[in-house]
Image (cartoon, rainbow, N blue to C red):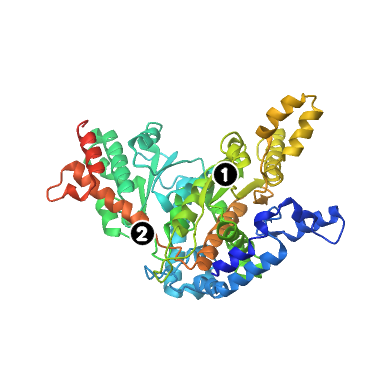
Amino acid sequence: MNIQKLTSLAQTAKTRSIFSLFSESNHSKDEGSKNRANDFSLSAAHLYLDYSKQNINEAEFEQLIDIAKEAGLAEAITKQFSGVKINNTEGRSVLHTVLRAPTLVKQQVLGDTLANEVEAAEQQMIKIVDDVQQGLLTSHTGQRFTDVVALGIGGSYYGVKVGLSALAPYHNTGLTVHVVANVDGGALEEKLIKLNVDTTLVVVISKTFTTQETILNANAVKQWMLSAVVSKGVNVKRSVIEKQWFAVSTNIEAVIAFGIKAEHILPMWDWVGGRFSLWSAVGLPLALAIGNDHFAKLKAGAYEMDQHFTSADFRDNMPVIMALLGIWNRNALEYPSLAILPYAHSLRALPGYLQQTDMESNGKSVSRQGDKLPWLTAPVVFGQEGTNGQHAFMQLMHQSDDIIPTDFIVALKGRSQYTQNHKVLVANCFAQSEALMQGKTLAQVNTELVNSGLSAEEVSRLAPHKTMKGNTPSNTLVMDLLTPEAIGALFALYEHKIFVQGVIWGINSYDQWGVELGKQLGASVLAAIDGVEGFEKETLSASSQGLIAMFKATT
């Protein structure tokens, strides 16, 4: 990426008003505004993107398109979708997209043997969902399941969590799904206290079946179940695990040793990264809640976005456009953050999911070749559901000197009976993007205060406190309704956006060695706490040693 070119290109943008771009036209002001709104928006796969409130003009955007072409984006897209091992540090393909593709595409990309394996896993998952829903799969007491506990963390957790809340109106199987990721025993206890051992199904999701948090929670749930049936004898104790537990893992031996039957194990593949794995058997807990038909529609929506991404010209390609705008804001205009603001209670978990997919993927500082990068990569992603965020951090967005680019996400139609509430919700979403762009100048505030009848002294005193900087760029993503297809497309949109940015930044978006370091040090600290023989606690800093001593003194 030519960072000097980007920096030079942004000099004019840094001094202009976004609002002024709406009147840059040879037509009348109203026609110019309409032209910009039309020219800087597009529809694809159940989604509509309005990016006209971004601080960029047509000529600048064409330069970004050139940067994407110079980075070899078209070739990179072809490589990813055809199975080339683009995860170069781990020697892996990145093929989560093939899991939502038709059978013919699977065969073309994976070959017949692996495609058949993937199809078999899909059919196994479909059968589990159907059998549970129809009462053919029951607990050790023969009772139908009422609840599901899904144990995982990171990519084995976030996609399912977002899907469960986003598609709450589509929960139609009679099952309540609870997700547990945090190693904090309080999080697990909060779930288990509500559940009945005799009607609870458990799904453990761990590729290696060694993930510390997940296996610790799995053992705790296992003990909870066995304790509840201890009086019924050893055969029943064995039966409760064999009948009520499922696992998604590659470590078959460890799963069976845990007590889960081989028939209850679903596969994972090293060419599907955790944070992109919802489309695999990792999505089983979500499918158990929404049923097979709706899960298939979720994948279909994602596949529609895949087709758009791989076929549309860059200038009309929604993921490419969002990626380029993100690079423009991050590297040219030098804004370090990105706010994700879904104006939908059911999308409240989306900001956390995108924190992981974006920052874990692109939070890097070296190139694919291991060289130090001369530019910054992933922004700091944060957010909250609207309108709650308006009464929290959005004060800073309006009146601090920090400019925080924003993605607003909203559905035109609500699902609740409270239509006026939804109208107000949508109005707030549209108003906030406008307010962040327009702001309010000192002259405007002065006029308002004078017209309100305040004295000159009061106007002078209050006016500085009521000004707002404006000029904050934003996208508005709109869907007609929060359907499985629209949510699938939304997930895929951000997946592809992140991929495109990784290509242009020249990084590998599909490894996460920083996460691995935390796991290693976590094991070291635990060894120090447990007083493991042979472990030299002096390898830890005096600060950590002191904190460990403080903890040990209380136990």
Q: Residue at x 39, y 64 (%)?
A: 269
Q: Is residue 16 visible?
A: yes
Mark 2 or mark 1, which is nearer the start of the sequence? 1
Label 2 amino acid? Trp
Q: Which mark is residue 347?
A: 1
Q: Is residue 299 visible?
A: no
Horizontal arrangement in the rendering, residue 11 relative to residue 543 (left or right): right
Do the residues under discs 1 and 2 have CB atoms within 8 angstroms? no
Please state the horizontal and vertical placement of residue 80, each as a whole percent of the image.
50, 70
- Residue sitting nearer the eye, 317 or 490: 317
- Residue sitting nearer the eye, 481 or 196: 481
Graded by Cα atoms within 10 Å as few (under 14), some (14 to 19) or many (20 or more), the crowding at tag 1 reads: many
- Residue sitting nearer the eye, 447 or 336: 447
Q: Residue at x 49, y 55 (%)?
A: 358
Indicate the quadrant where residue 442 lies. top right
Horizontal arrangement in the rendering, residue 323 relative to residue 452 (left or right): left
Which element is circle 1 on? helix
Which element is circle 2 on? helix
Image mark count: 2
Indicate the quadrant containing the C terminus: top left, top right, bottom left or bottom right.
top left
Please state the horizontal and vertical placement of residue 502, each as a whole percent of the image.
50, 64
Residue that badge 2 annotates: 513
Q: Residue at x 37, y 31 (%)?
A: 193
Please state the horizontal and vertical placement of residue 350, each as a whole percent of the image.
53, 47
Q: Residue at x 58, y 48 (%)?
A: 404
Horizontal arrangement in the rendering, residue 156 relative to residue 333 (left or right): left
Label 1 amino acid? Leu
Please state the horizontal and vertical placement of residue 125, each as a whole percent of the image.
45, 56
Instruction: Determine whether 409 is above or below 112 in the image.
Output: above
Instruction: Determine whether 178 is above or below 496 in the image.
Output: above
Horizontal arrangement in the rendering, residue 77 relative to residue 36 (left or right): left
